[in-house]
Image (cartoon, coloured by chain):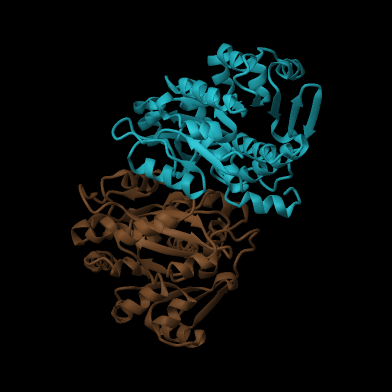
Chain colours: A cyan, B brown
Amino acid sequence: MADYDVLCIGNAIVDIIAQCEESFLVENGIIKGAMNLIDADRAELLYSRMGPAIEASGGSAGNTAAGVASFGGRAAFFGKVSQDPLGEIYTHDIRAQGVAFDTMPLSGRPPTARSMIFVTPDGERSMNTYLGACVELGPEDVEAEKASGAKVTYFEGYLWDPPRAKEAIRLTAQYAHAAGREVSMTLSDSFCVDRYRGEFLDLMRSGTVDIVFANSHEIKSLYQTASFDEALAAIRKDCKIAAVTRSEKGSIIVRGDQTVPIQATTIRELVDTTGAGDLYAAGFLHGYTQGRSLRECGDLGSLAAGLVIQHIGPRPHKNLKHEAEQVGLL
Amino acid sequence: MADYDVLCIGNAIVDIIAQCEESFLVENGIIKGAMNLIDADRAELLYSRMGPAIEASGGSAGNTAAGVASFGGRAAFFGKVSQDPLGEIYTHDIRAQGVAFDTMPLSGRPPTARSMIFVTPDGERSMNTYLGACVELGPEDVEAEKASGAKVTYFEGYLWDPPRAKEAIRLTAQYAHAAGREVSMTLSDSFCVDRYRGEFLDLMRSGTVDIVFANSHEIKSLYQTASFDEALAAIRKDCKIAAVTRSEKGSIIVRGDQTVPIQATTIRELVDTTGAGDLYAAGFLHGYTQGRSLRECGDLGSLAAGLVIQHIGPRPHKNLKHEAEQVGLL
């Protein structure tokens, strides 16, 4: 029996979230909808121009781990914080959600990562991430028993930005596959795909990655095509399962010849899209590791994504197991 | 002409907010709905037991200042933080809202104050406040030109908990009255009223305070009566204006013989009552300092309170000026 359902690996980031007008993004050279990497100086500058904010633990794979735990799944997380107040907040929040998190924190500089997230009136989020302590994640942080003992390992494409995290991923994937487990990843961001296209394709084609999560922009970037159908046909051949989200159009899951369309859930008000993809992956992976059909996996993903975009912040405010039970999905 | 519409004085606190079940309050000896004062050790213990949280700048009078600024009013704030990461967050948020905030921060210990706020399924918040740097606020922090230059000074009854803040209040009130301004306070919390009943009554009866904000529990505690009507009759005689909030029943404003009942606004979902009273005061004081009728002041208060209780966190997520314009109140 597996010790964990899902092991997530990602940049451990505290989000600093504020609303802004469209013009703010233009004036400050922020690419809308993207994850913009910034250094410490730009972080200080942008913060001085940012409106009143709230802080919440985030990071793509960390959000997914929190989501899996909220569904009642057994989740673990690898990610690097520093021993500072934001690191304490990050560690508290992910453990308090029930996620096993034991990566050794840095004792000094750089500080815990933070991402300034600007949410425009259309609910879209534009992220500005200072990676801080995340640059120190490396293969020495791989806990072998968790890597071997999780039904599915899930990591974010963003981990190709810090220098040695990819070594941690490759080592974890070796442990996982040696134990007969599966490995999944999210393509994270179309600009991230653009930075690491060749390596991401190699991860898939070499079988290092079995299951791929992406949105339509990311798969089009991956295959450098303007055609969603063309990209979908290509990714179908490059991995065992791909789950591709399409915002309000729902998602499409492909496995070999199978094509499973999933509807988005009806929402009351779109407030902040931060965490939508992460929580879709959480719902999918929770269903998948419980042996559910692809349809059920997708519906659980839609449910979780639909809930997280109705409030500010990247992690669920409601208990996802309870919410899924209420609509008969669990 | 006045330099500011409203000067607010209060404990400068970062809120750490999580949801919990009713049983958690009982098991941890937390008085529901109240502000529980805690020391550093208990803060650590409660945090270890707290669920995943979000952080947001708070503090009663700070929330009111942010609300006044969001309505488009000119607001200033006195309050003490330390030079640490939570202090930086607090300072950023209140300034970014447009509030003038120049109180000198502490350079060392104690750290910036934080309040762990547990929100139960009924939306009620129970606060656990470690006062930290707030205990150092004193008369040396009174900026004479702001005290003289604000149409209304507003302070929280909570300031009787730290040792020397009351001296700052008395000095500020002297400056304000010498300049022909008005002074207002909130009774803050029924337990706080119980701690300082005599002093609060003296503030009102001596004319140090002109306008009093309270909820029904607080005025009943003030006059040690179970009868709301009796308490209302008493407070009518003890100050120029009293605005008494009654949760979903709205509020009642009394001035001499006048009695103005105000309806609560209709809300979609009660999520978190944190900040309700603070934002009511913000709406009222914004209207009052713009020369509006008591009815309009109350309606602005209801609008702001109704908005803040529909999301997690103590300060408005929407621009209050815009919201008030949408419903024809401004």
Horizontal relation, residue A235 to residue A39: left or right: right
User: Depth check: B156 or B127 in front?
Assistant: B127
Position of residue A320 relative to residue B267, above or below, is above
Can you name the residue that lies furthest to the left here?
B140
User: Depth check: B241 or A130 in front?
Assistant: A130
Residue B208 picture location, percent across and down = 29, 74
On the image, which quarter does residue A107 sit in?
Answer: top left
Task: Tally the marks.
Answer: 0
Horizontal relation, residue A52 to residue A176: left or right: left
Position of residue A54 relative to residue B274, above or below, is above
Horizontal relation, residue A236 to residue A111: left or right: right
User: Depth check: B297 or B45 in front?
Assistant: B45
On the image, which quarter does residue A48 sit in?
Answer: top left
Residue B50 picture location, percent across and down = 45, 56
Q: Quadrant of the N terminus of chain A?
A: top right
Residue B45 picture location, percent across and down = 37, 58
User: Depth check: B274 or A322 in front?
Assistant: A322
Q: Residue at x 72, y 54 (%)?
A: A326
Residue A122 picture location, percent across and down = 62, 37
Q: Is residue A323 visible?
A: yes
Q: Is residue A274 visible?
A: no
